[in-house]
Image (cartoon, rainbow, N blue to C red):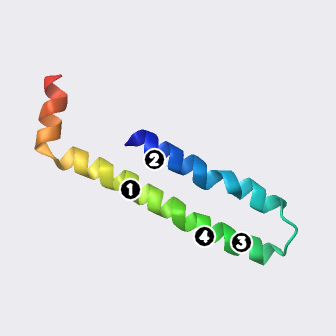
Amino acid sequence: MSLEMVLDAIIIAMPIYEISKLQMPTSRKIGIASVFAVGIFVLVTGVIRVVITYTSNPVSRKLHQDS
C-alpha cells in the first residue's frame, strides 16, 4: 500500500513543473495547479487514514509485536 502512495505522489508531482513552463497567464497556471493540489489533499488524507487504521487496530498491533 505504501508503494501505491509513493507512486501517487510522483504522478501528482510530475506535471507541476511542466505547468510552470506553460505560456499562459499566471492565474490560469494557479487554477490548473489547484486541481493537482486537490489530488495532493486526497493523497495526504489517504496516508492519514492508513496510519490511523493501523495504529487503532489491536489485531495489527499484536501481529506487529509478535514478529
Assess whether mark 2 and mark 1 are in contact (beta carbons under 8 angstroms): yes
Three-letter amino acid code at the position of disc 2: Met
Cα distance, mark 3 to mark 1? 24 Å
Q: What secondary structure is found at the residue carrying circle 3?
A: helix
- Disc 4 from disc 3: Cα separation: 9 Å
Q: Which residue is mark 4?
A: 35
Question: Which x, y percent locates residue 3?
Answer: 44, 39
Give the SS element for disc 1: helix
Q: Is residue 63 left or right of residue 37?
A: left
> What residue is rendered at 12% in x and 33% in y?
62
Q: Which residue is at a point 31% across and 48% down the rendered structure image?
A: 51
Q: Point out the tag, 2 or 4, that comes first from the N-terminus.
A: 2
Q: Which of the two residues, 65 or 15, is positioned nearer the viewer here? A: 15
Task: Measure how far apart labels 2 and 4 are at the Cα level.
Answer: 18 Å
Q: Is residue 9 left or right of residue 27?
A: left
First in sequence, mark 3 or 1: give its number.
Answer: 3
The disc at residue 30 is 3
- Find residue 36 and report its horizontal and vertical position in percent: 60, 64
Quickly name the residue at label 2: 5
Quarter occupied by the N terminus:
top left
- Quarter where residue 32 is shown: bottom right
Are the two marked residues, 3 and 2, in contact with CB atoms closer than 8 angstroms? no
Of callouts 3 and 2, the N-terminal one: 2
Q: Amino acid at mark 4?
A: Val
Find disc 1 in the rendering and name its residue: 46
